[in-house]
Image (cartoon, grey):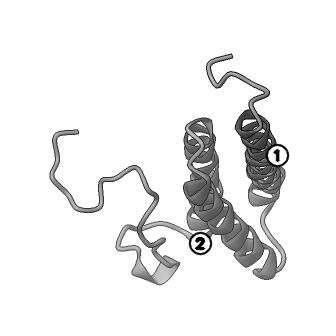
Amino acid sequence: SGDSNDNHNDKPAGKILTFDEITLPITVDEYIGGLCDLTGEIGRFAVARGTVRDKESVKICLETSKNIYMAIRMAGKLPGNINKKMNPLKNSIEKMERILYEQSLMEMAGRKFQSSMEEGGFDAED
């Protein structure tokens, strides 16, 4: 967007409003359901950032989703419709963990490739 906001730099930023901060007429169940849905969007953003090797954004996304997951788990007994959303949330967290793991492997492989190049063993364009 042609917006000149200081916040618009493809890095995740912001604050998740608590239930008490929401000024719309929603129930606690709707709020928790919305948080679960939000983690799906966070996961999609993390995948997009992972494809451009933006490890810091993926880490922020992972931490945010983990915090939401833990907060919901600590809430105790959840309504059935929220319980159904917990597995996709957990899967999203696991996917972000895999992205970070794969990025770490690529970084390590890149270092090995780099040291081989310095020894004159590889052409950087191959």
Vertical side of 116 occupied by 6: above or below = below
Q: Quadrant of the C terminus?
A: top right
Type of residue at label 2?
Answer: Val
- Location of residue 64 by image quarter: bottom right
- From the viewer's perspective, tell me whether residue 100 is left or right of residue 20: right
- Location of residue 66 by image quarter: bottom right
Residue 92 in view of the camera: yes
- Location of residue 122 by image quarter: top right
Instruction: Name the one closer to the observer, 11 or 39.
Output: 11
Residue 62 x/y as whole percent: 68, 60
Badge 1 density bin: few <14, some 14–19, many ≥20, Cα 10 Å? few
Look at mark 2 in the image and give the residue it sits on. 28
**Residue drawn at 79 percent across, 69 percent down:** 78
Type of residue at label 1?
Answer: Leu
Look at mark 1 in the image and give the residue it sits on. 105
Please report whichever mark, 2 or 1, sits nearer to the chain's N-terminal start: 2
- From the viewer's perspective, tell me whether residue 108 is left or right of residue 6: right
The secondary structure type at the circle numbered 2 is: helix
The secondary structure type at the circle numbered 1 is: helix
Residue 1 x/y as whole percent: 23, 39
